Amino acid sequence: MALGVSEEHLELAASVRGYAERHAGPMPGLLGLHLPEESGGQGYGLAELAVALEELGDALIPGGFLPTVLASSVLASSVLASSVLAPSGGTGETQKLLAGLADGSRSGAVALDAGLAGMAAGVGLILDGESGPVLGGGRADLVVLPVRHRPGGAGPQELWAVVDAADLAVTELDSLDLTRPLATVRADQVPVPAGRILTGLGRAEVTSLAATLFAAEASGIAGWAVRTAAEYAKIRHQFGRPIGQFQAVKHRCARMLTAAEQAAAAAWDAATAWDEVPPADEAGVSPAHYAAAVAAVVALDAAVSCTHECIQVLGGIGYTWEHPAHRYYRRALSLRALLGPAADWARQVAELALGGAGRPVRVDLPEDAGPLRTQIRADLAAVAALERPERTARLAGGGWVVPHLPAPWGRAASPLEQLVIAEEMKHAGLRAPALLIGAWVVPALVSYGTADQQERFLPATLRGEITWCQLFSEPGAGSDLAGLTTRASRDEEGGGWRLTGQKIWTSLAKEADWAICVARTDPSTRRHAGITYFLVDMKSPGVTVRPLREMTGDALFNEVFLDGVLVPDDLVVGEVGDGWRVARTTLANERVSLSGTWTFGCGTPELLDVLRGLGEEARQSQLVPAGRLVAEGHAIDVLGMRVTLKQLSGTEPGATGSVRKLLGMRHAQEIAEMCWSMQGPGGALGSSPWARQVLLTRALTIGGGTTDIQLNIIGERILGLPRDPEPPAGEPAG
């Protein structure tokens, strides 16, 4: 659940975590981590600050670190925009303030609610009024305040002013967060010189910075909750076994992990968006504002939900005063309340998206990719100049179709090279043959196939000349290969194996030339032992294909009956009885790809199109749920990009890929359901395109392992929760 993706970020996180464990506080120097060196900082950015905040949130460090770095981030943003309102010396004044916040000699806070009133006084202002609750306001030396100002009889404007706390009346409040104080601040005719007035900072800028930093800390809180719940579920026994073995608890912890992964992705994306300093659009909205709004929805809610669910897993012990769970829950609730309701932020996400704002999810390759790109571009240009048949043969023979595999079938391409190849293929107008199921067959044959099998099948598959299907799932076992009943018995007369059984949910079975099939060659063994991996000619006698009509009325899938189908010995892949190992290679995918989504026409663009087609009143009523879906969709896209970046940097992707797949499938369903619901009575028509999409997307959380199985996998393989007990002897496995 680490927020950072590079080795440097992971090392920073480890340093902060270690120091916090030893000293119960932030490391010296962290206060200026994100500030430029000319302001007394260390010259990094908000991404590094977010990494530190995540760790401090995980450790629930008390005190004024978060409010102080928020204040310095606001001041630094004003300097970056070169918009301090002063005839001269204003920037210098702000730089001095920043230096004090960076070295810890001053602490800061920011009021986020409605502003105080400001009256012009020369080139400065006179402040009056009272703020709402200010995080860290009771301990701050400097407070950044929103000010309502009417210059020269014009309409009201909002400015931001930096005021010494000593000039304000500060009233401590009863804080829900027991580790961090709140206060209100009141100004009674407080003069603010021009050098302390920040212009060019709209409310969106300040609240978006707050959302970004709050989200980073919230990510750490969510991570703590997941880890605490999972560790407790491993050791707490009830009814004779650890509670983590019960599916309800296992799924609860797994869903917590998915929420925490989304939180980390959204917080990281928001922080990196600020560091890229993207240009704002005509309305003054930058991609950083959009990413921050997404983080405000996703990460803050994740912190609340994960701590809530953690207490549920802990049971009675989690409800005690002594256990720290309620302190994390309190902080999560406090962050959510101070930043503002999730519904308001969701509405903002929807409005920004409808207005054309957004943040592209893309991987920017390092500068050292230049020479590699030049060579690959030249090689592919030569391929593009060929006629189509020869072009396809050259792509297959040159290893361009599956470049991650070893030569001669691939190019043994590194993650970086794979991405460059993908970009340059697109640039050259080249498209590799669509391997479909063949993309699973090729790595299995490369790893376990004989030389004859490789020569017979790989070149033709890579050229797109062989179409494959997969005979894995069965009516009684689904995708659980341990429950296979299809049998393969020795053909004593002619040699080879006779396959008998039924397969189901097989796509492309009617069109396929060949199939990969797993069957049980040793019925005396249990679970994954005794399974063998075969290559089956779909034109063999005894193969019967029957289309399965799905709820949409289409017949994309098929059931396949095998009635004594003869498979020669030379079509066994790997060792007899070792098919599970080969199948795992088939299902694994080490290929690095550019970030993409599989929405099946049910993504954010489609949702926004439906929203735009509604009347104004109807559209307004749908903005909050739509904004939540848009925010979640963006976070899922970022998860995909983070997998790629982790592969590029050599760090372990961990749970990110599994979580992305699980969330992405359900997200497409939710988009379809919302678009269908916005049709009103028209959704009752069989011709409704969105009714069809609702029916179509039902398959997404079933195929390739149901959502329930995916949650089990996340709980057991990633969180380390205990597996389900083995069935007693004599009962069927699976």
Image (tube, helix red, strand yellow):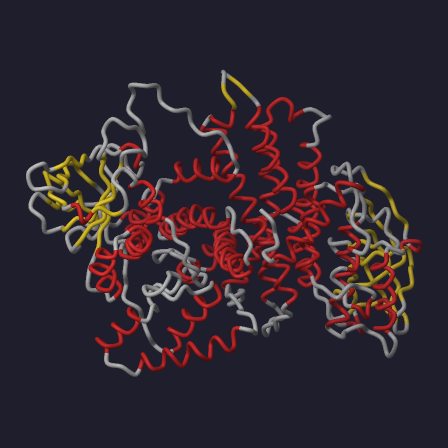
Residue 553 in view: no
Q: Which residue lies furthest to the right in this view?
A: 166
Q: Nearer the viewer, residue 41 or 368?
A: 368
Q: Nearer the viewer, residue 241 or 309?
A: 241
Residue 110 in view: yes
Q: Nearer the viewer, residue 698 or 276?
A: 276
| Image coordinates for residue 89, horizontal then vertical, percent | 88, 76
| Drawn side of residue 342 relative to residue 510, left or right | right
Q: Which of 194 and 231 is in front in this view?
A: 231
Q: Residue furthest top?
A: 239
| Image coordinates for residue 264, horizontal then vertical, percent | 59, 50
Image quadrant containing the C terminus: top left
Q: Is residue 383 above or below residue 652?
A: below
| Image coordinates for residue 688, horizontal then vertical, percent | 28, 53
Q: Is residue 159 above or below residue 230?
A: below
Give the quadrant of residue 730: top left
Give the quadrant of residue 125: bottom right
| Image coordinates for residue 588, horizontal then vertical, percent | 38, 49
* Total numbered circles: 0
